[in-house]
Amino acid sequence: MINIRYMKNTEQQFVDNMMKKKVYIAGPLFNDHERNFLEAIALCLEKEGFKCFLPHRDLTGVEQSELKTTSMTQKTKDKIFVADLTALRESDLTVALITGWDIDSGTSAEIGYTFAQGKPIIGIDASERRFRNLFVEGMITEKVQHISAIIPAIKRTFS
């Protein structure tokens, strides 16, 4: 006999566990379009209860004026590095925007770090059809084409 109550409790525990996952969102930050796309990814995940770290949005301890220049002080660069590395360490997975001519170098580093930690990476390619760096692409657990496909991919990864 199948215990329906147990199945519902198990399913609810799975959902509750998923909602506690911390997600590092990686991607290029060079223009409004890229930042907006990353923010849309975070919004989608946060609506479902995930805790997200989005580097350009969630960085603390650095003045916004310091981020609007290409001549940052070493102190500012160090703060950014430590904040991003801490967020990567604390995350359960990384969702990476892998659009563009080639995967962004910073995004590739974040993917590599996540992979080396044995954590999954969901790559979103936004339906671009390109040949990408096969070494970096080999670290990606699953690729999806649309934001709406990220949560099902995360569920598959952790089930």
Image (cartoon, rainbow, N blue to C red):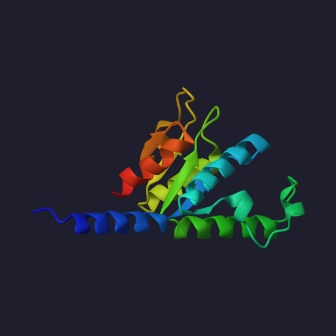
Residue at 69 percent of width and 60 percent of height: 55
Locate residue 67 relative to residue 151 in the image: left or right: right
- Residue 87 position, x and y percent, is 60, 67
Task: Give the image quarter of residue 86.
Answer: bottom right
Locate residue 35 relative to residue 141 in the image: left or right: right
- Residue 102 position, x and y percent, is 61, 35
Task: Give the image quarter of residue 47.
Answer: bottom right
Q: Is residue 31 visible?
A: no
> What is the total number of numbered labels drawn onto the structure image?
0
Where 24 falls versus 143 (above or below)?
A: below
Where 54 falls versus 41 (above or below)?
A: below
- Residue 131 position, x and y percent, is 52, 28
Task: Give the image quarter of residue 79.
Answer: bottom right
Residue at 54 percent of width and 60 percent of height: 23
Locate residue 72 relative to residue 101 in the image: left or right: right
- Residue 126 position, x and y percent, is 58, 35
Q: Quick one: quadrant of the C terminus?
A: bottom left
In-front residue for pair 17/73: 17
Tell which residue pokes out farthest to the top in this image: 129
Where 86 falls versus 24 (above or below)?
A: below
